[in-house]
Amino acid sequence: MGQIYKVFIKESLLIIGDEPQDAAVDYLGNAQLLNLVQARLKSAHPPVYVFARNLSEVWNEFKRNFRLIEAAGGAVLNPDQKLLMIYRLGKWDLPKGKIELGEPREMAALREVEEETGVPRPEIIGILPTTYHIYPLNDRLILKRTYWYAMRIANGFDFLVPQLEEDILDASWCDPKEVLENRKNTYGNISLVLDALQEELS
């Protein structure tokens, strides 16, 4: 099976993979990928799949165009199978944040869940897909790589405390119907994580 990288750029999706596909664009060089990124930073575009035979080499060259930030987060379920979601900057999201220097990814994900929502000591029950997104910051382009984990808490915990200093206005346990509604106002990478969580649980 081939490998792919899905990179979210605002509302658009750039896919770089090593398996030929219908309507794929052949990889023509690093400048081509940068042009695709810049176009998507300016306005929304349909998803584009770029076929790269030497994917590892292409991906490593592509990453060098950006400042890489690593983050970790969690999709947390309670005993009632409700999902912990946060509302930040006008979108529904999952708790996540930057990995501190020398911090293991799993510990960073657990720490961020507790800091952003107040939920104590969740347990990691699975690994979810790593996501990538690109955004501008202080005249630099950032490539954020986020490691995601499926988590569970053993006991009900209702005293959620959204981390206001991180612009989180709400933290809620959401039933499947609410999750479906929230997905209408979330990010592409979060939808990818939620799809993978559903598969993990089925």
Image (spheres, rainbow, N blue to C red):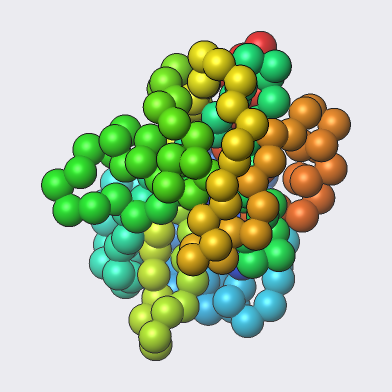
Relative to the observer, which residue lies in front, 103 or 148?
103
Q: For residue 130, what is the image quadrant?
A: top left
**Residue at 77% over, 55% down:** 185
Q: Position of residue 69 (x, y in %)?
A: 32, 60
Q: Is residue 118 visible?
A: yes
**x%, y% of residue 12?**
65, 62
* The image quarter in which residue 94 lies: top right
Q: Residue 48, can we see it?
A: no
Q: Is residue 169 above or below residue 95?
A: below
Asked if residue 145 lies left or right of residue 39, the reply is left
- Would residue 99 appear left or right of 144 to someone viewing this image? left
Residue furthest left as drawn: 102
Q: Residue at x 66, y 12 (%)?
A: 202
Q: Nearer the viewer, residue 67 or 150?
A: 150
Q: How many marks?
A: 0
Please report the residue visible at 55 percent of the width from the left and 62 percent of the height from the top. Answer: 164
- Locate residue 7 relative to residue 171 in the image: left or right: left
Q: Percent position (x, y) of residue 158?
A: 64, 31
Q: Is residue 32 above or below residue 160?
A: below
Horizontally, residue 130 falls left or right of residue 36, namely left
- Residue 162 place in picture, x, y as percent: 57, 51
